[in-house]
Image (cartoon, rainbow, N blue to C red):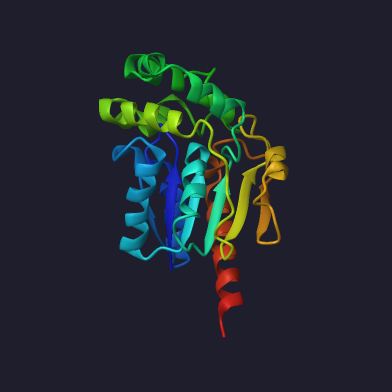
């Protein structure tokens, strides 16, 4: 079995999920990362690129964090996924997503320029406020996670296009066979756990797992806990489908 990891801008997928992947390898679960904004910007185009990645590796399980959640929900309408694990992202057009998506393109492009965005991201008023332990996400860690992507003009342009293309996205439940898991850091201030209760996907085909005290970056701060929950969820699903 294999898992595809997706995470939103501006973080490098391979670095963001590295420790989670290492832990999963001990459970004999293969995993892949996909930095989707290296390829395109519009949600519809990105979904096609990601679909090709799923088919290439015959993947039935995806994990999406942050601003990658709209992409994961789009994929459920296109591909017979077995399990969709969503973590601390926009489950509907909330205020964070609306602010980013409605910001004029020229302004967003300027804000994403590395001379502005990287110092801001690494400051104590930006991403480092969304962690439990600032020592885990100290300045050099933030820079290493996002500097490569933000230094790429193509990536920045794709990010702007992506944010605008998901402005009015609405989650749809077309893949009735998929099992949804909301793996949520319950102390996240960007995407509070209360948003899970408002989504129409939360039906009998879903479950919610809270990371107690987890902030927005719990996959980096608590990778073993995340990986072990993913492993148990996949193992349970396969046990249910075994003859």
122 and 74: which one is in front?
74
Q: Pinpoint residue 155: horizontal percent, then vertical percent.
A: 31, 31
Q: Quick one: 44 or 122, which is closer to the camera?
A: 44
Q: Residue 94: x and y, percent? A: 61, 30
Above or below, 126 relative to 235: above
Quick one: which residue is furthest to the bottom in this view?
243
Quick check: 184 left or right of 141?
A: right
Q: Quadrant of the N terminus?
A: bottom left
Q: How many marks?
A: 0
Q: Residue at x 54, y 29 (%)?
A: 97
**149 shown above or below 180:** above
Q: Residue at x 52, y 44 (%)?
A: 219
Task: Give residue 43's quadrant in the image.
Answer: top left
Residue 106: x, y in percent? 37, 15
Image coordinates for residue 66, horizontal then vertical, percent: 52, 38
Q: Is residue 35 visible?
A: no
Q: Quadrant of the C terminus?
A: bottom right
Q: Within the image, what quadrant is residue 216 found in?
A: top right
Residue 226 in view of the camera: yes
User: Eyeballing the image, is 147 above or below 114?
Assistant: below
Q: Is residue 40 left or right of residue 201?
A: left
Q: Nearer the viewer, residue 87 or 141?
A: 87
């Amino acid at each position: 079995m294999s898992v595809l990891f997706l995470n939103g801008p501006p973080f490098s997928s391979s670095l963001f999920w590295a420790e989670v992947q290492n832990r999963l390898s001990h459970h004999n679960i293969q995993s892949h990362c996909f930095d989707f904004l290296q390829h395109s910007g519009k949600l519809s185009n990105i979904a096609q690129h990601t679909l090709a990645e799923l088919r290439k590796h015959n993947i039935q399980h995806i994990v999406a964090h942050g601003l990658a959640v709209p992409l994961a929900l789009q994929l459920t309408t296109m591909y017979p996924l077995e399990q969709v694990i969503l973590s601390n992202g926009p489950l509907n057009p909330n205020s964070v997503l609306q602010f980013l998506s409605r910001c004029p393109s020229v302004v967003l492009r300027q804000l994403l320029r590395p001379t502005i965005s990287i110092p801001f991201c690494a400051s104590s008023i930006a991403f480092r406020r969304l962690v439990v332990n600032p020592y885990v996400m100290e300045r050099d860690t933030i820079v290493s996670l996002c500097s490569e992507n933000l230094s790429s003009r193509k990536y920045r342009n794709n990010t702007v296009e992506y944010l605008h293309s998901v402005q009015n996205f609405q989650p749809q439940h077309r893949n009735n066979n998929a099992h949804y898991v909301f793996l949520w850091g319950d102390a996240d201030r960007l995407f509070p756990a209360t948003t899970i209760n408002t989504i129409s996907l939360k039906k009998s085909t879903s479950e919610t797992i809270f990371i107690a005290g987890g902030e927005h970056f719990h996959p980096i701060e608590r990778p073993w806990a995340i990986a072990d929950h993913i492993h148990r969820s996949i193992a349970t699903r396969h046990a249910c489908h075994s003859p």
